Amino acid sequence: MRFSFGKIWAAAVCLLVFASCAKDTSESYAGIEQRSLDAWMKLHRPELLGNRQEARGFSYYVDVLDAGSTDKADTLIAETDCWVQYEFTARDLNGNVCMTRNAVQAKQQGTFTRYTYYSPYFRYSGSDYTTLLEGSYYALREPLTLSEEYIAEHPDRGLKNGMQARRGTELMLYLPSSLAYSSSGASSDAGYGGQYELDANRPAILHIKVTGRVSNPLAYEGETVDAFVEDNGTVCPVEEEEDKDDPKLASVRRSLRDAETDEPELPDTSVDPYKYTWYQAVDTVPQLYISHVFSPGREPATTYNWKNTYSVPYFPYNESMAALDKKINDVLVERFGAGTYKGDSIKSGETASIWYIGRFLDGFIFDTNIDEVKRLIYGEVQSEGSAYQYEVPEEGDTSTLKTIYAWYYSIPQLRYGQWATIVTTSSFGYGASGKSGGSSTSGGSSSSSYLDYYNYYNYYNYYNNYYGGLYGNSYYDSYYNNYYGGLYNSYYYNNYYYDDYSSSGSTTTTYTTEIPAYSPLLFEIYIEAKE
């Protein structure tokens, strides 16, 4: 039987309303709720009464579990405008989880899915604007008032009155709804949810831990991509003026589609023209790389040196990523073979049939249309995959483009029958807004609580897009973020990419994996041989 905290809370508020009518019939609901939260704290967390914080005319309470890093290089969140990465779990006042980014919490609540990317939130925190939940924004940017008694009781936490958040800071916040989820409440059945939902206009307990702080997300992800390709092979240098007359380097830099050499099926990367593992797709486009020598049929099998490897204690990411990559390579070779480098080049106006695996740079697979890989990652195949029909546009014509720009620049550099890897920054992927994850159900009744959650995420996405358009483009000089993200997301993300289903009776559930803002992407692709 599901316990409803909302009913008990509503009853408590009603009692306060009746009591207050004798004194002041004009008191707002927010005022009544604030007094109720104060009374709850006095009864259940009296040791935190001295840690009362004031924000926008409301009060909230904080329990500092860890003051954070003592490294001077880890500057305060409030020192400059920045993007904050933080782990997150939201509860009602009974401790029931309603939202979480933690895989273990989700598993305990019975909401864990293999489609869900359990990673820290990535939200903008600026002096004039933020995409953080309001209560967490104040807690992470304002000095925290802590009582002397509280500080003395926790000598191991590195606390001091007036401290401010930085990397490693871990907080438990007790917020009135005016600083939390207000009239929307919070719930989800899409992997990030809990067993319970938080009703509208109810207080919330937020557990947050800052895992990172990024001043310039575009520069940060560019450095991440460069580091990844350098850790996984050699990068062809950008052409210098003095190298133009060097025929050997010119041969290396030429697109493989123009090469006239007779290469073996699995080329030896120690000799030209396959000396380099990675090539820039276009010399003038930074951090968009192609590996022409990737093949699951190579010996030893191609595996990546993943940094900050995605790992949760559940299938399929509860083993080494190298072991998972080896399993993936085996099923790819069995399905498609080793591939070739002798096929015809892909020309404008043609249509290529593409099989793909989409991954983040920690190894997590956010999508694939290959059934054998679906079975490995999701444990089953609910919907049979089919090759994506990529219509190659004329060079310079993006008016009918239906994919991300990473593919637009990369696919014409490849051949029919070829394996390849593409690595790109978000500027040629999903941009500053990213893409929300979720699930939707058709053919039966849908959950209104999920729709509330989905609307809540749309609210965040609206502000992400606004910030991306205003700040990302003008300050970071990244014109492409929202244009690319908007063009790709509306058509491609919801209509093709995430087509794995689970059904029960007459209902069908479609899952979509979240793409966080400013996420670099990796695609392993196979292009069918030309008939």
Image (cartoon, helix red, strand yellow):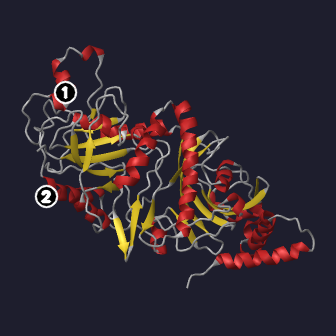
Q: Which residue is mark 1?
A: 252
Q: What's the amino acid at mark 1?
A: Val
Q: Is residue 487 above or below residue 111?
A: above
Quarter of the image with the N terminus is: bottom right
Q: Is residue 91 left or right of residue 497?
A: right
Q: Secondary structure at mark 2?
A: helix
Of callouts 2 and 1, the N-terminal one: 1
- Residue drawn at point x = 48 percent, y = 32 percent: 479
Determine whether 128 is above or below 285 in the image: below
- Determine the residue positioned at 38% across, 34% down: 399
Residue 426's place in the image compared with 205, above or below, is above
Residue 305 image offset from top left, x and y in percent: 30, 48
Estimate the x, y position of residue 480 in percent, counting from the top left. 45, 34
Closer to the observer: label 2 or label 1? 2
Q: Residues within 10 Å of mark 1 (few under 14, many from 20)?
A: some
| Residue 24 relative to residue 147: left or right | right
Label 2 – label 1 distance at C-alpha: 31 Å
Foreground residue among 397 and 291? 397
Location of residue 526 in the rendering, given as x and y in whole percent from the top left corner: 20, 47
Identify residue for label 2.
334
The residue drawn where x is 52% and y is 66% is 450
The answer to whether residue 375 of the structure is visible from this angle is yes
Q: Is residue 52 visible?
A: no
